[in-house]
Image (cartoon, rainbow, N blue to C red):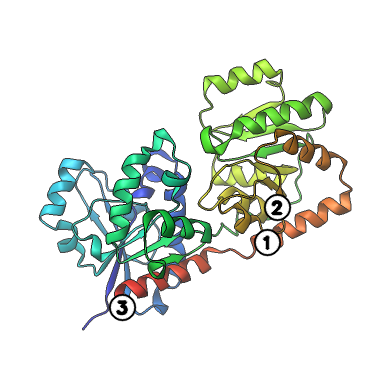
């Protein structure tokens, strides 16, 4: 009998090849696949990739030694219904376990699936634009039917077990890593010092609180500017900057590459990440890997990622963030360098290699090998 087969659905990476942009799920899926490729010869089963669209984007663009399957059909609900009805994916690939890394999908056999549920935000911090009612109902039903569930932090595991009623024994934690060749310390601080924040948005990302904290800081100091990595800041935010009188001190970095993001981290004095809930908190890790200290909240998974190296401020007191900005300005060089070293040390606890190995444990469980 041949080796059993795990099929990994990489449709979440298609945006990268079609539009040049990846969301967090697509980005982490791509990095996980690359890490799994490096250990493929040491696992007792096959790992293969799958994508579906009319353009051929997806597996054909991913440079790995893993076997690849592409279904040349449009990714549309009516087509997917037919694909499920005739079990086309199963016939094409012959998988034993299907890994869905993007939280949820409609499949022919959910009992043969491993699902990555990145967080339980739809229970703990529901936002209308993510359709939380649908997520609570459909994600939960799917995860309960799956053979195993993967997630990226102990915090998310606790939420998944509590809110989705998934047995703890079938939930596996595989923390994310970072690109070690890209997010690394470089001595290139900006001639005009600045604080930065990435993954900016409204709602739980809470960027407006950072803007208001910076406005108080800007009234007291001309030392630092603020750079926000925000693809499409809403009109309300732009008006808020004007009303606060800081439009000349705040810059937006739109549609930047990972290389440009790493350079921003490397040049910044500190990264501020005022999120109210995270399944993991990749900006915290990537900033620390660059040797740039992080100011964040000690909620959800952020304490796991930041460890003892992050600076934690109050979620309810905007002045706490302002005080942190002022402290960086007054901090002795030796103390700042120590903080940078502690950040690097904390980041080194995470890697995509470790994430891949822990993912393999979930595959083994699902395959019963």
Q: Which quadrant holds residue 182?
A: bottom right
Look at 71% across and 44% down and name the residue there: 313
Q: Which mark is residue 346?
A: 1
Secondary structure beneath label 1: helix
Mark 2 or 1: in front is 2
Residue with the mark numbered 2: 310
Q: For the residue carrying disc 3, how many other residues have a C-alpha within 10 Å: few (<14), some (14-19), or many (20+)?
A: few
Relative depth, front residue between 354 and 148: 148
Extreme residue toward the left, this view: 86
User: For mark 3, what is the residue?
Assistant: 368
Query: Which picture quadrant has residue 317?
Result: top right
Q: Is residue 121 left or right of residue 72?
A: right
The image shows residue 79 at horizontal and vertical percentages of 16, 44
- Measure how far apart labels 1 and 3 are at the Cα level: 34 Å
Q: Pointer 2 and pointer 1: residues touching (CB < 8 Å)?
A: yes
Q: Secondary structure at mark 2?
A: loop
Q: Residues within 10 Å of mark 1 (few under 14, many from 20)?
A: some
**Along the polypeptide, which appears first: circle 2 or circle 3?**
2
Residue shown at 52% from the left, 57% from the top: 155
**Residue 193: x and y, percent?**
78, 36
Q: Position of residue 333 (x, y in %)?
A: 87, 49
Q: CA distance from mark 2 to mark 1?
A: 9 Å
Residue 64's disc is: none
């Amino acid at each position: 009998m041949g080796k059993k087969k795990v099929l990994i659905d990489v449709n979440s990476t298609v945006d990268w090849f079609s539009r040049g942009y990846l969301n967090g799920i697509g980005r982490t899926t791509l990095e996980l696949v690359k890490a799994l490729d490096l250990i493929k010869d040491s696992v007792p089963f096959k790992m293969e990739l799958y994508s579906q669209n009319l353009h051929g984007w997806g597996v054909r663009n991913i440079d790995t030694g893993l076997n690849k399957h592409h279904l040349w059909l449009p990714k549309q609900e009516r087509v997917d219904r037919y694909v499920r009805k005739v079990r086309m994916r199963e016939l094409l690939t012959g998988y034993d376990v299907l890994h869905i890394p993007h939280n949820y999908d409609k499949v022919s056999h959910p009992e043969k699936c491993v699902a990555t549920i990145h967080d339980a935000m739809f229970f703990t911090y529901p936002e209308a634009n993510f359709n939380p009612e649908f997520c609570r109902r459909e994600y939960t039903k799917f995860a309960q039917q799956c053979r195993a569930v993967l997630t990226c932090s102990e915090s998310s595991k606790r939420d998944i077990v509590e809110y989705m009623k998934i047995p703890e024994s079938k939930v596996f934690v595989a923390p994310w890593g970072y690109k070690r060749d890209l997010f690394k310390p470089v001595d290139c601080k900006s001639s005009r010092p600045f604080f930065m924040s990435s993954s900016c948005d409204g709602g739980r990302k809470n960027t407006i609180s950072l803007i208001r904290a910076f406005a108080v800081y800007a009234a007291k100091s001309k030392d630092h500017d603020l750079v926000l990595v925000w693809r499409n800041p809403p009109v309300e935010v732009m008006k808020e900057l004007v009303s606060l009188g800081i439009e000349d001190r705040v810059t937006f970095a739109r549609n930047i590459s990972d290389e440009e993001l790493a350079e921003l981290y490397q040049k910044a004095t500190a990264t501020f990440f005022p999120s109210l809930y995270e399944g993991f908190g990749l900006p915290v890790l990537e900033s620390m890997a660059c040797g740039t200290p992080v100011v964040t909240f000690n909620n959800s998974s952020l304490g796991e990622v930041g460890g003892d190296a992050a600076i934690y401020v109050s979620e309810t007191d905007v002045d706490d963030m302002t005080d942190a900005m002022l402290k960086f300005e007054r901090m002795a060089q030796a103390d700042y360098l120590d903080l940078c070293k502690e950040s690097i040390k904390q980041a080194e606890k995470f890697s995509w290699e470790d994430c891949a190995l822990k993912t393999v444990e979930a595959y083994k469980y699902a395959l019963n090998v």
